[in-house]
Amino acid sequence: MNQKKFLAITLSLVVFASASSVLAQNSTSLKKDAVKTSASNDPQGSPDDFVDLLRKDIRSQKKQIVAENGVERC
């Protein structure tokens, strides 16, 4: 009789542990999907996009300044 109780408790714990790990994985993937969806719907874009645009603008301004002053690049 003790072996049956032990087996039942052990099986219950195994089922509980596996179910909780499956739920945790699903929760994590849902959060990642939500972040991707919200990022793609963001009209302002990501911070990385903003930094890229800022760098392009600075490069363009630098080229204009260099061209106006006739300075060669070292």
Image (cartoon, grey):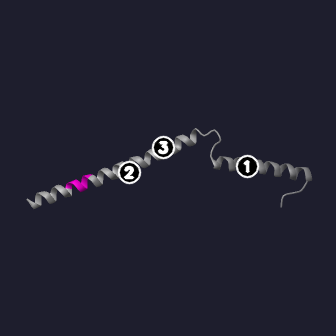
First of labels 3, 1 by sequence position:
3
Query: What is the secondary structure assignment of the residue under circle 3?
Result: helix
| Residue 29 x, y percent position in the rendering | 43, 47
State which region is magenta. Answer: 11-15
- Count the numbered circles shown: 3
| Residue 24 x, y percent position in the rendering | 38, 51
> Magenta includes 63?
no
Measured in 3D between alpha carbons, the distance from the residue under mark 2 to the one under mark 3, in whole angstroms, is 14 Å
Measured in 3D between alpha carbons, the distance from the residue under mark 1 to the one under mark 2, in whole angstroms, is 39 Å
Q: Most prominent secondary structure in the magenta stretch?
A: helix
Q: Amino acid at mark 1?
A: Leu
- In the image, is residue 69 above or below residue 41? below
The residue beneath circle 3 is 33
Residue 6 sits in quarter = bottom left
Mark seen at residue 9: none
Residue at the spot x=29%, y=55% of the render?
17
Q: Mark 1 packing: few (<14 Cα in 10 Å), some, or many (20+)?
A: few
The residue beneath circle 1 is 54
Residue 40 sits in quarter = top right
- In the image, is residue 29 above or below residue 2? above
Residue 74 sits in quarter = bottom right
Quadrant of the image for the N terminus? bottom left
Residue at the spot x=78%, y=51% of the render?
59
The residue beneath circle 2 is 24
